Image (cartoon, helix red, strand yellow):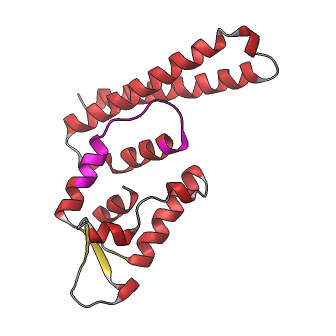
């Protein structure tokens, strides 16, 4: 999704695209081979990205998003989220937020509502965890409180953004 989204902004060389995707993911969730995603070659093979011209310049060729790639990116952006705070979810949410502006206003509202709902589920999970007093020794309660503070701020932010789309 990161590669497809980067190409919606402008044409890029293979190297520039690979470096941008790697840099974004590494900064967001740290270096992770399993989160680097689908290779650019596979995206080309699937017809989601294409070279700008017919001259094969290898990695120097400019790549652009195909119409099928744009549709795939929109499908990714509209996809459901999984519950939980995994690194993969963090990455998916960040990518949805980064490229959400290509969706219609109604679709953006739907996605922000889904993200807010996911945060509400996370809040319920954390609040339930706080009731398990036998587990709340050491610094765990403080850590849960920090997580609750952050999730409440995310819910507030989603609510503000949703209101701007009404």
Q: Position of residue 71 (x, y in %)?
A: 20, 54
- Name the residue located 30 percent from the left edge and 75 percent from the top edge: 63
Compared to 103, does 158 lie above or below? above
Furthest toward the left, the residue is: 67
Q: Position of residue 16 (x, y in %)?
A: 44, 75
Q: Quadrant of the N terminus?
A: bottom left
Q: Going by the image, does 25 lie left or right of 50?
A: right
In magenta stretch: residue 76 = yes
Quadrant assignment, res 93: top left
Confirm whether residue 10 shows in the render.
Answer: no
In magenta stretch: residue 37 = no
- Name the residue located 55 percent from the left edge and 51 percent from the top edge: 28
- Name the residue located 80 percent from the left edge and 17 percent from the top edge: 137
Compared to 55, does 87 lie above or below? above
Quadrant assignment, res 26: bottom right
Q: Position of residue 149 (x, y in %)?
A: 60, 24
Compared to 156, does 47 lie above or below? below
Q: Quadrant of the C terminus?
A: top left
- Name the residue located 53 percent from the left edge and 34 percent from the top edge: 85
Front in this rendered view, residue 63 or 45: 45
Q: Position of residue 83 (x, y in %)?
A: 45, 29
Compared to 125, does 35 lie above or below? below
The span shown in magenta is: 72-88
């Amino acid at each position: 999704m990161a590669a497809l989204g980067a190409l919606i902004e402008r044409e890029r060389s293979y190297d520039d695209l690979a470096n941008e995707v790697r840099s974004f993911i590494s900064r967001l969730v740290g270096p992770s081979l399993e989160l680097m995603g689908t290779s650019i070659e596979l995206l080309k093979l699937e017809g989601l990205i294409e070279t700008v011209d017919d001259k094969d310049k290898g990695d120097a060729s400019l790549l652009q998003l195909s119409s099928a790639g744009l549709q795939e990116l929109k499908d990714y952006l509209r996809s459901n989220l999984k519950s939980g705070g995994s690194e993969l979810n963090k990455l998916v949410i960040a990518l949805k937020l980064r490229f959400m502006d290509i969706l219609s206003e109604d679709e953006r509202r739907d996605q922000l509502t889904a993200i807010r709902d996911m945060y509400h589920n996370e809040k319920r999970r954390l609040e339930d965890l706080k009731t398990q007093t036998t587990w709340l020794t050491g610094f765990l309660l403080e850590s849960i409180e920090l997580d609750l503070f952050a999730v409440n701020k995310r819910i507030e932010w989603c609510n503000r953004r949703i209101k701007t789309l009404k």
